[in-house]
Amino acid sequence: MNLREWASNSEELMALIPSHDRANSSDIKVLGICWRLKNDTLSVPGPSSEKLEGVFTKRGILQATASIYDPLGFFSPTILQAKIFIKELWENKFEWDTKLPTELLARWENICCDLKTIPTFHIPRYLGMNAAGHQPIVYSLICFSDASSKAYATAVYLHQFLPDTCNCSADLVFSKTHLAPQGITIPRLELLGVFIGTRAMRFIEKELHLPISAKVLWTDSQCVLQWLHSTKSLSTFVTNRLKEIKSLGGTSFKYIPTQENPADLATRGKSLSELLQSTWWNGPSWLTKPQNQWPEYNVPEVNPQAEMKSDVKNEIIFEAKLMVGQGTPDTSTATTINLSDIDVERFSSLQKLLRTTAWILRYTNRLLLKKQINSGPLTAPEIKKAKELWDLHIQEKCFSDTIRMVKKGENCNLKQQLGLIIDEQGILRCKGRYQNSELTQGAKCPKLLPPKEYFTKLNVEEVHSNMFHSGVSQTLAEIRQEYWILKGRSVVKRVLNGCKVCQMVEGGPYRMPQIPSWPKERVVQSVPFEYSGLDYFGPLYIKNYVNVASEDEAPATKKVWVCLFTCFAIRAVHIELIEDMSAEEFLLCFRRFIARRDIPKQILSDNAKQFKTARSVLNKIWSDVVRSDDVIDFSAAKELSGNLLVI
């Protein structure tokens, strides 16, 4: 195979290659990146002007942003502007093909101007220094990380140093940006920046194949630096990430002010014109100096233990606010709770679920309201409150559209069929015709429950257990004293069919085991007695008239046995009478059988249980018959493959 399309930035090398084997263009794509041979530069492909024209929807903006292929992150501060813009579109819940308002379109046009310019900017491909006639170059990896409320980022630079001339250079080789998740504090975002920075340095060190002498990571977060040197117990979130950060051996962590941190540009988003005039490409000016001339910034003293306590407290407060909403000023307890974080399927009973929810509610109320709430065992009002919260959560999860229509007074099928109303707690209830009866409020207006929720199953199991495992009708009637379950009878029947207690008490006998297939010898066509079974039965008593002198003399009684041969295929029977169970008698019997029926391929003796009861006696008798040397010699001479199963 003739290799063609050769390309190189060396004119001497290209002169040695025939013209028909050279690449036709001076601009070549290498792994998605454009390589200009003449200048030996790289450029990042991006959306063309035609694709950006007429982009007015979220779908078009996402498509235009995704068309920029920048695997090394050279233009990540500029591309971050588009990512932040898309995030805002999602937060404002714009539809895919809805045209954006005028003020957002004007902002998008400014971003488009930078996106169009990205492919026109060229980056030098070769970053090396001329070390001919000098000592070997000393290579170092310098990483900067930063975070803001919008994003966290890292930038990695390759630092080269010639010891004899003290010449230095620093060039950007990789960067990475991530949008900041909602609800994460700035110190944690700074930690995530350091986290992806260590991963980036590990990746660059592996791919460059250069002898890296030092790895330095700079961050402007004093909190993260204290965490790195703290020996106290930290929160799980911080501990897990510190563990991987410290796993990158040989890395020193230093402090740098925000105004000198080039990674700060990648956390806020910059236009391309601002990026070209910044320190993004080569880092701070002191990177062009030897390491012994780099500045040392003093980090203010921070108590690691106090920082640890503050982090743990902030984590607890943050997670508590996610779980429980703040109560109104005139209330002493929180009124809402987010139950979506509780996996209801981990609970085997309704009481366990309600008690766990009540404990969480008590703890979060005490934490947020900073009051001494109830102590000791849970009270009935707390359990009742937990159950009301679960009722409300399940209904909002499964009947959100119905609740909205009932609040607006609109008609829907469920409202017309069940007379749905919303009570003062916001719970959806079914209004029936028993309003003037003396029944409880739950029986008059039962709460609505969906049929396929696990919470519904727990309620049915709870009522079924309290009713002493009664039947479907009794359990359903008791449930309807508080709840109305859609397709209630089928739901109750399904739950009761899975009740282990009912299955154990009311279950039938065990099934017979499946009968195995017949052996091959029983179902394959064969000559009669080709496969035979062997057994003895007896003794039988016969009268021996031999040596009887007169008719008046009584004959002697004699024991005899019967040797039974049966064919496996056609169930034919061959019987031989034997006088005793000696080996000689069996051999004569077996010879008579062979003379009449031909030599069988296999003979099997049964191993029935009735023989096991006479093991001590029969072992002695059978061992003399079928294990004797005469029988074995005869079987070998006749080429018999006898398999006599003897007890």
Image (cartoon, helix red, strand yellow):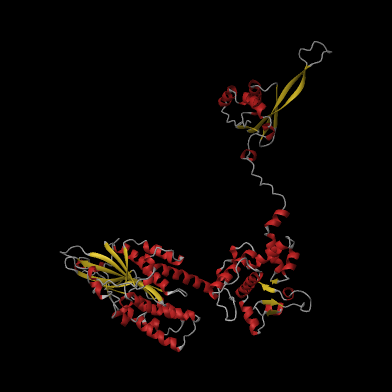
- Residue furthest to the top in view is 549
* Quadrant in which the N terminus is drawn: bottom left
The one of 456 and 621 positioned closer to us in this rendering: 456
397 to the left or right of 99: right
Which residue corresponds to the image point at 47% horizontal and 85% vertical from the top-left?
A: 100
The one of 503 and 192 positioned closer to us in this rendering: 192
Q: Is residue 25 visible?
A: no
260 to the left or right of 233: left
269 relative to 540, above or below: below
The one of 57 and 183 positioned closer to us in this rendering: 183
Which residue corresponds to the image point at 72% horizontal and 22% vertical from the top-left?
A: 560
328 relative to 252, above or below: below
Which residue corresponds to the image point at 48% horizontal and 79% vertical from the top-left?
A: 90
Q: Position of residue 637 (x, y in %)?
A: 56, 25
Q: Position of residue 238 (x, y in %)?
A: 43, 67
Q: Position of residue 593 (x, y in %)?
A: 66, 26
Q: Position of residue 28 (x, y in %)?
A: 30, 72
